[in-house]
Amino acid sequence: MTKWNSTLYDDKHKYVSQYGEDLMTILNPQKEENILDIGCGTGDLANEISKAGALVTGIDSSPTMIEAARGKYPHIRFHLQDGEEDRFVAQFHAVFSNAAIHWMKNQRQVVQNSYNALLPKGRFIAELGGANNVESILLALEEASKTLSIPYERSLLPWVFPTKEEMTAHLTEVGFHVLKITHFFRPTPLVGEEGMYNWLNMFSNSLFKHLTSEEKKTLFHECERLLRSQLYEENGWVADYWRLRFVAQKLN
């Protein structure tokens, strides 16, 4: 289980929600629609959706994220729940998810749960990390771990980055009609001179929870050194993000 630092997330990783604003345009929430936000984080996009007059329910598996979301947006319903848990009957006009489903190992179950939660003609709109996402960073983590004699196994990574074909299969097998699915490269600027270090500390921290703070610091700085020639540009760090975005509909 990843332990999330909601303060670091809001302070240095606001771009996660900001990129989701484009996805929200595709969602096009309507007044009085009932919308489920899977992996809502600290609630920023759930709040934006609610501004259209929609009734939003946000779920996230992190207690710290849900606590932060409730503190910022007390008018929205937020629940501590993993996307792999099937708790909702058909009641939502739309299911929305931004940069969250790749944290859920059983993505077939997430898709099934989303289908179950939707009313007939309901839509499922999501973006997540796709195949090849942050590949340069993962290779640097592997190399740095070997250099520093730190145990590292890719199988222990907390993410699953599916291919377009794999996600299409998940969606169609549970009954969705896939309206659109795209896999695209989106280089993503990180915040500040310590952008890469903060990214590693935020998103791969749980992979190295057996290390001391100093050991992790050494590892992350070694990754920075290895990545500088590839991912550091004139204006700072840029992560090699690949995204998978889809729009699907429940027909009946």
Image (cartoon, rainbow, N blue to C red):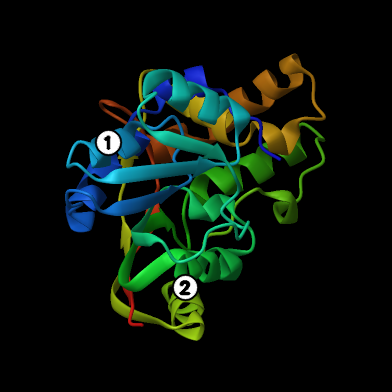
Q: Which residue corresponds to the image point at 44% horizontal and 60% vertical from the top-left?
A: 130
Q: Which residue is mark 1?
A: 18
Q: Find residue 126 and report its image quarter.
A: bottom left
x and y percent of residue 131 in the render?
48, 63
Q: Which mark is residue 219?
A: none
Please state, as top left, top right, bottom left or bottom right, where the C terminus lies in the image: bottom left
Q: Is residue 238 above or below residue 122?
A: above
Please state, as top left, top right, bottom left or bottom right, where the N terminus lies in the image: top right
Left or right of 97 in this view: 25: left
Is residue 132 shown to the viewer in this render?
Answer: yes
Q: Nearer the viewer, residue 4 or 114?
A: 114
x and y percent of residue 181 in the render?
31, 72
Q: Is residue 100 above or below residue 43?
A: below
Distance between the alpha carbons at the discs numbered 2 and 1:
24 Å
Q: Nearer the viewer, residue 147 or 151?
A: 151
Q: Nearer the viewer, residue 16 or 191?
A: 16
Q: Which mark is residue 167?
A: 2
Is residue 197 shown to the viewer in this render?
Answer: no
Q: Secondary structure at mark 1?
A: helix
x and y percent of residue 149 in the render?
82, 35
Q: Earlier in the sequence, mark 2 or mark 1?
A: 1
Left or right of 234 in this view: 156: right
- Which kind of residue does numbered mark 2 sit on? Met
Q: Which residue corresponds to the image point at 46% horizontal and 64% vertical from the top-left?
A: 117
Q: Which residue corresponds to the image point at 40% horizontal and 38% vertical from the top-left?
A: 231
Q: Is residue 125 above or below residue 72?
A: below
Mark 2 nearby-residue class (10 Å; few <14, some 14–19, many ≥20): many
- Which kind of residue does numbered mark 1 sit on? Gln
Q: Find residue 21 and report its image quarter.
A: top left
Q: Find residue 249 and report its image quarter.
A: bottom left
Q: Secondary structure at mark 2?
A: helix
